[in-house]
Amino acid sequence: MPPKFKFTKAEITKAALDLTKEQGISALTARALAAKLGCSVKPIFGLFKNMEEVQREVLSEANKLYNSYLREDMSSGKYPVYKASGMGYIRFAKEERELFKLLYMRDRSNEGIEENREEIRPLIEIIMKNTGLSEDEAYMFHLEMWIYVHGIATMLATSYLNWDMEFISRVLTDGYIGLKHRFCGEGEK
């Protein structure tokens, strides 16, 4: 009969996620995770093949948490939906710094930006509706706006900035209006 472990896979994953939130992904080692759980490494490797599998689970859970930030901000009605997507991204960077770094400040050279075009299709469609731009123009608009949003998020995640969300909202509005003027030749529409 296989040995019984006192932890479930979900409990170990949660502890690994918490450790990553506190200290970053580089701190996620078998020994550190075992210490957080108050056990030896045996229960970890009884449920996971290796630490890479634990890290993949942490990455998946971090992505789920990020998506919950987006859903929350985009459904809150506090901002227009497109702006809310940027505010959610930035809020995640500000509140979950280490998870933001894990998701968006790691080597992603094996990922292509074109591969995520379908993921952002709803945002592209919002831009098309709000501006009258073609799909390709709306995609370029989004890429330029995302560079702006990512820059702010990165500076918050690395503690370079400590802006409040109200100021960030104003800054994003200014960036959006500037891009809209460049792409559409007009101000607010």
Image (cartoon, rainbow, N blue to C red):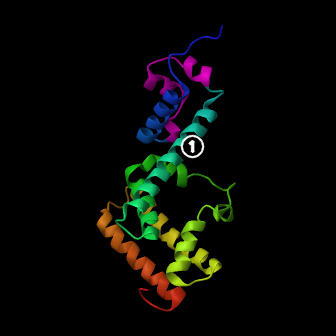
Which residue occupies the foreground of this view, 61 or 94? 61
Q: Is residue 138 left or right of residue 170?
A: right
**Residue 136 occupies which quadrant of the picture?**
bottom right
Q: Is residue 173 above or below residue 45?
A: below
The majority secondary structure of the magenta stretch comes to helix
Q: Nearer the viewer, residue 76 or 103?
A: 76
Q: Position of residue 63 (x, y in %)?
A: 53, 48
Is residue 44 rendered magenta in the image? yes
Image quadrant occupied by the C terminus: bottom left
- Quadrant in which residue 21 is drawn: top left
Q: Residue at x 55, y 84 (%)?
A: 132
Q: Vertical placement of 142 versus 31: above or below?
A: below
Question: Residue, x 47% and y 87% (percent of image)?
Answer: 181
Q: Quadrant of the N terminus?
A: top right
**Which region is colored magenta?**
25-47
Binning the other alpha carbons within 10 Å of mark 1 as few (below 14), some (14 to 19) or many (20 upward) gives some
Query: What residue did someone put label 1 on?
Result: 60
Q: Residue at x 60, y 39 (%)?
A: 56
Percent coordinates x, y for residue 186 in the rendering: 46, 91
Q: Is residue 105 visible?
A: no
**Measured from the top left, where is residue 76 in percent x and y?**
37, 60
Please tell me which residue lies in front, 67 or 152: 67
